[in-house]
Amino acid sequence: MCVRTVSLGTCDTLLAHPASMTHYSVPREEKIKYGITDGLIRMNVGIENVEDILADLNQSLL
């Protein structure tokens, strides 16, 4: 259900990894300065049922 993407032009739940996507070309020192670490995942919650989103996340983390 959660989609990996760089675009925010939808009402779906989206996941992004800024360090390797939107901020790929930013120097490492600058990324760290702004808290953009390799472990950071950005989640934009959409309009889906919250229980469905949580179930999808729980399944993916197992």
Image: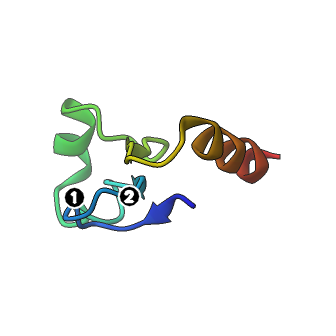
**Whole-number angstrom distance, CA of label 2 to CA of label 1:** 22 Å
Disc 2, disc 1: CB below 8 Å? Answer: no
Out of 33 and 1, give the one closest to the viewer.
Answer: 1
Q: Which mark is residue 23?
A: 1
Q: Which residue is mark 2?
A: 12
Q: Is 54 placed left or right of 22 in the picture?
A: right
Residue 34: image quadrant is top left
Q: Is 13 placed left or right of 18 in the picture?
A: right
Please name the amino acid that badge 1 sits on.
His
Tell me the SS state at disc 2. Answer: loop
Instruction: Pinpoint residue 57: horizontal percent, then vertical percent.
Output: 65, 45
What colouring does the structure picture have?
rainbow
Residue 18: image quadrant is bottom left
Instruction: Pinpoint residue 21: horizontal percent, then vertical percent.
Output: 31, 66
Instruction: Give neighbour class at mark 1: few <14, some 14-19, many 20+ (Cα, 10 Å).
Output: some
Quadrant in which the N terminus appears = bottom right
Tell me if residue 15 comes above or below residue 7 in the rendering: above
Q: Is 44 placed left or right of 1 in the picture?
A: left
Out of 36 and 17, give the one closest to the viewer.
Answer: 17
Tell me if residue 6 comes above or below residue 38 in the rendering: below
Please name the amino acid that badge 2 sits on.
Asp
Q: Nearer the viewer, mark 2 or mark 1?
A: 2
Q: Going 16% across and 57% down the picture, which residue do you hit?
A: 26
Instruction: Pinpoint residue 55: horizontal percent, then vertical percent.
Output: 71, 43
Instruction: Give neighbour class at mark 2: few <14, some 14-19, many 20+ (Cα, 10 Å).
Output: some
Tell me the SS state at disc 1. Answer: loop
Instruction: Pinpoint residue 42: horizontal percent, then vertical percent.
Output: 37, 44
Residue 11: image quadrant is bottom left
Q: Which mark is residue 59?
A: none
Q: Going 45% across and 65% down the picture, which residue do you hit?
A: 4
